[in-house]
Image: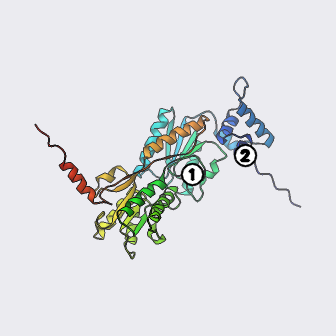
């Protein structure tokens, strides 16, 4: 007969569930022990009792990484070439600094191997907490952090029931869909997203709901999620324009992809806003200054970053936190409604003439 299987190791999550506290509380209590007087709070005493009764044994590698506070918050971003994510990180950086910490950022390019490499580098720097912006809906390295230090908060994308700070992406998609259908469009396409990101899934969910509420549909062949860059949007638009019937409107889940879509339209001899309406998402600074200004859903990315920073510091300091969704706003410009140019012209004409 072979040896009986070894029991699964006791994790901090198991202790937290048994003790009725958050995992971060268990982590802090087991890391800090008692104060110099030997006193323990009621929560701490319960955690120690449960850990002892369940036979918890700390991971010696993790213990070796932990010491005193580093006052560092690690931030894992998929990329910083995206203006929206760069602005989000600036919000994180400033808010963290205002709370007495420093931030250090690394990019993962949404690559699973690189995600784990960058996480290891963050842990080696002994960060006190992590803000994670590259969670994948199909499972990711975040699962491996649940039972271990450091505490973390997700930002931009959600994953399972983990604490996150996001835009209300479903509402943003609904705003875009309502706008395009109200303009009279029925043959509409979607592009400019990543299939494993909650941002894309939620925006499409809200967009589809808006269409269905008004008797329209979004068949699968009119959804192309091939990336978030300008070239990605251009490539997707080239494919969409070969469909029969050709879409009269495109919702791009990212402004850079929307700009690529508009470039493809011009290559095909079409005028954005007149021949094919285009709506983006994020409202990056360049969107209003394009030759044909881009209609888009404004995403409060900087405020999202600031909010995530405050929440992760709360978690470090053992305060209860919950997920937050911030509200988007539709900004209508010429790329979806060319009447906007005429409205702006009339508004300018109505301005009082300066007198000397």
Whether residue 230 is visible here, answered yes or no, is: no
Q: Are marks 1 and 2 in contact (CB under 8 Å)?
A: no
Quadrant where the C terminus sits is top left
Q: Residues within 10 Å of mark 2 (few under 14, many from 20)?
A: some
**Nearer the camera: disc 1 or disc 2:** 2
Report which residue position mark 2 lands on.
14
Q: Position of residue 8 (x, y in %)?
A: 77, 51
- Image position of 346 (left or right of 334): left
Report which residue position mark 1 lands on.
117
State which tag comes first along the sequence, 1 or 2: 2
Q: Is residue 234 above or below residue 113?
A: below
Quadrant where the N terminus sits is bottom right
Q: Residues within 10 Å of mark 1 (few under 14, many from 20)?
A: few
Q: Position of residue 86 (x, y in %)?
A: 42, 47
Q: What element does badge 1 sit on?
A: helix
Whether residue 253 is visible here, answered yes or no, is: yes
Q: Position of residue 299 (x, y in %)?
A: 42, 49
Marks 1 and 2 sit apart, C-alpha to C-alpha, by: 27 Å
- Image position of 208 (left or right of 340): right
Q: What element does badge 2 sit on?
A: helix
| Extreme-right residue of the structure | 1
| Extreme-top residue of the structure | 37
Q: Residue at x 19, y 48 (%)?
A: 350
Q: What color scheme is it?
A: rainbow
* Most foreground residue, 81 or 13: 13
Q: Residue at x 70, y 36 (%)?
A: 30
- Image position of 57 (left or right of 107): right
């Amino acid at each position: 007969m072979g040896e009986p299987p070894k029991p699964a190791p006791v994790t901090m999550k198991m202790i937290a569930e048994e003790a009725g506290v958050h995992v971060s509380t268990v982590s802090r209590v087991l890391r800090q022990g008692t104060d110099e007087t030997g006193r323990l709070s009621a929560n701490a005493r319960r955690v120690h009792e449960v850990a002892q009764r369940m036979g918890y044994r700390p991971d010696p590698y993790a213990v070796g990484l932990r010491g005193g506070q580093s006052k560092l918050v690690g931030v894992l971003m998929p990329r910083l070439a995206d203006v929206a994510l760069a602005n989000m990180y600036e919000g994180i950086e400033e808010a963290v600094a205002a709370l007495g910490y420093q931030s250090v950022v690394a990019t993962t390019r949404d690559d699973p191997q690189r995600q784990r490499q960058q996480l290891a580098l963050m842990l080696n720097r002994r960060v006190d907490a992590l803000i994670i912006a590259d969670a994948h809906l199909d499972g990711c390295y975040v699962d491996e952090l649940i039972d271990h230090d450091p505490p973390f908060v997700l930002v931009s994308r959600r994953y399972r029931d983990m604490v996150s700070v996001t835009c209300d992406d479903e509402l943003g998609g609904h705003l875009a869909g309502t706008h395009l259908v109200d303009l009279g469009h029925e043959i509409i396409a979607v592009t400019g997203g990543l299939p494993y990101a909650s941002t894309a899934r939620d925006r499409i969910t809200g967009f589809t709901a808006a269409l269905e509420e008004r008797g329209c549909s979004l068949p699968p062949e009119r959804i192309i999620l091939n990336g978030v860059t300008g070239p990605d949007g251009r490539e997707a638009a080239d494919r969409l324009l070969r469909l029969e019937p050709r879409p009269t409107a495109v919702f791009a889940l990212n402004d850079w992809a929307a700009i690529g879509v508009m470039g493809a339209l011009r290559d095909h001899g079409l005028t954005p806003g007149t021949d094919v309406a285009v709506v983006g998402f994020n409202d990056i600074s360049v969107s209003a200054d394009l030759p044909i200004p881009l209609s888009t859903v404004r995403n409060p990315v900087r405020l999202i970053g600031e909010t995530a920073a405050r929440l992760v510091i709360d978690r470090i300091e053992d305060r209860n936190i919950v997920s937050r969704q911030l509200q988007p706003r539709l900004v209508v410009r010429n790329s979806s409604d060319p009447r906007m140019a005429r409205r702006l012209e009339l508004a300018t004409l109505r301005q009082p003439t300066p007198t000397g």
